[in-house]
Amino acid sequence: MPADGSVKLKEKVRALPNEPGVYLMKDRLGRIIYVGKAKMLKKRVSSYFQRGRARAIAQPKIKALISHIHDFDTIEVKSEPEALLLESNLIKQWKPRYNTDFTDDKRFLLVRVDLSLELPRFTLTRIRKDQRSRYFGPFPHSSMLRKTLSQMRQKFGVLLADGIPQKQTDGRWQLYDDVRQDIYSHDNLISTTGYRHRVEQACEFLQGKSREWLESLRNEMQTAATKLHFEKAAELRDVISALEGTLHRTRKFERDQTLLRSDNEALTTLEKELKLSGLPQNIECFDISHISGTFVVASMVHFTEGRPDKDQYRRFKIKSFIGNDDYRAMEEVVGRRYRRLAKENKPMPDLVVIDGGRGQIAAALKAFIAIGVEPPALIGLAKKHETIIFPDERDPLNLSINDPGLNLLQRLRDEAHRFANTYNADLRSKKLRESILDDVPGLGPKRRVALLTHFGSIDKLRAASALDIAHAEGIGPKFAAELHTYLHRESTSKKPANPELPHE
């Protein structure tokens, strides 16, 4: 920094009050590079410009900060707690370079276990590296954490960062060498499955430690705040927030893993019970919905690896006939769906599920024959006794009510039913909204058609002004005003909540 610049800064420092506040250090381009708080601004800021201070400081980053300070601003506040809050907000707003560096240096330790490995081990890290691993912490006291991990290794017989396991000829693993194995009470030779059971127990132990640690930190923060140790309280608050986030993510991770295991079990069961050639990774299910033969629609839902894949959902209006015939409707929509897949050279699902019994599944099979496409595995699910129906000579199949494969088929069927009913309700709601024009005094069929042609829908007509309505063919200003008043007096329906979804 030039000499004249140094003089100006010292003059600026001398003018500062000895009051609480926040200071913002700037570089020669005016960029904020550090935000700090002070109980007494003059005393704190002047410490940055004392002769020889940079040389006396051991930390390179603080030396670098001081060497880059070209100017500063201050904000005076009423109290130290207010300064602490303002400092936090300004750091979030400006993200100064040196605040970020110091924060990184102060990151507390996490325990990481990568469950994708054949033999997961517990290691220490300061950064979350991926989504497939589980993390525990943060833990502010590294010495206590390392002691905890050492105790955990002895208690559960798991691997930490050290240890080089050796695979034996019988497929088991020797976790430690001959000297170290005498230290631990657990068997040194273990199968992969047995070792993973140890890992699960160790994870439960760390989860409990995290909750215990969280409660201790809350008490410590409260004590610090009571004693007006605001910096300590703020530091503990940040650790508590991070630990609560870790516990939340861990619970989500555990829930996702439970669902994943459940889905895999269900797919494996279906492969076995339905005698499929492989896991049914992609399943599609059809349902027909109507009200007394009107508003007949169909739905198709798609599950990938046991979970809903809503981007591949489809819904259908029945086009080939008018009336109430579930079998014809099923034949039409199945034919339309798989004719398109065949035409576009897209893969067929591993399993097709039809909501219904023999009549519905016969109609679906007829559709495949008509379009000349070899059907994938095909079953019906008859709701009365949750009976699985096959299109060939096999006897109907009834699985246990708690069978994971049956439960997956029920979720498919119920989702298809919900999706079809939602579409049906949307169509009925649209028809009811359009029928309001039938009751408008003085509005005949010709002008009704003119209005719908001009605006495209009743919703757009209702949103139009009287002046806009008057531009439609055959509608004058006087009648447009009367119609506008009528529509807004009678408007009790809402627009459909669901967005348009792909049709087949």
Image: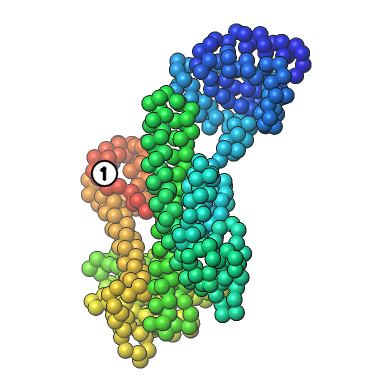
Compare residues 141 and 449 and report the one nearer the observer. Answer: 141
Q: Amino acid at mark 1?
A: Ser
Q: How is the image coloured?
A: rainbow
Compare residues 94 and 194 and report the one nearer the observer. Answer: 194
Quadrant assignment for the C terminus: bottom left
Q: Point out residue 478 in the picture as x, y percentages from the top left corner.
A: 30, 36
Compare residues 219 and 408 and report the one nearer the observer. Answer: 219
Mark 1 lies on residue? 491
State left or right for residue 207 relative to residue 402. right
Outermost residue on the bottom side: it is: 393
State left or right for residue 5 relative to residue 304. right
Q: How many marks?
A: 1
Q: Point out residue 280 in the picture as x, y percentages from the top left corner.
A: 45, 75
Q: Point out residue 4 in the picture as x, y percentages from the top left corner.
A: 75, 11
Q: Is residue 452 above or below residue 195?
A: above
For the question of whether residue 205 can be seen, the reply is yes
In which quadrant of the rendered view does residue 416 lie? bottom left
As helix, strand or loop, the secondary structure at mark 1 comes to loop
For the question of whether residue 458 can be seen, the reply is no
Compare residues 360 and 229 and report the one nearer the observer. Answer: 229
Q: Tell me what residue is drawn at x 62 percent, y 12 percent.
A: 13
Q: Tell me what residue is drawn at x 44 percent, y 53 percent.
A: 206
Q: Tell me what residue is drawn at x 22 percent, y 68 percent.
A: 292
In which quadrant of the rendered view does residue 475 lie? top left
Quadrant assignment for the N terminus: top right
Q: Is residue 147 above or below residue 70?
A: below
Q: Point out residue 172 in the picture as x, y percentages from the top left corner.
A: 55, 75
Outermost residue on the right side: it is: 2
Q: Is residue 365 above or below residue 234?
A: below
In which quadrant of the rendered view does residue 261 lie? bottom left
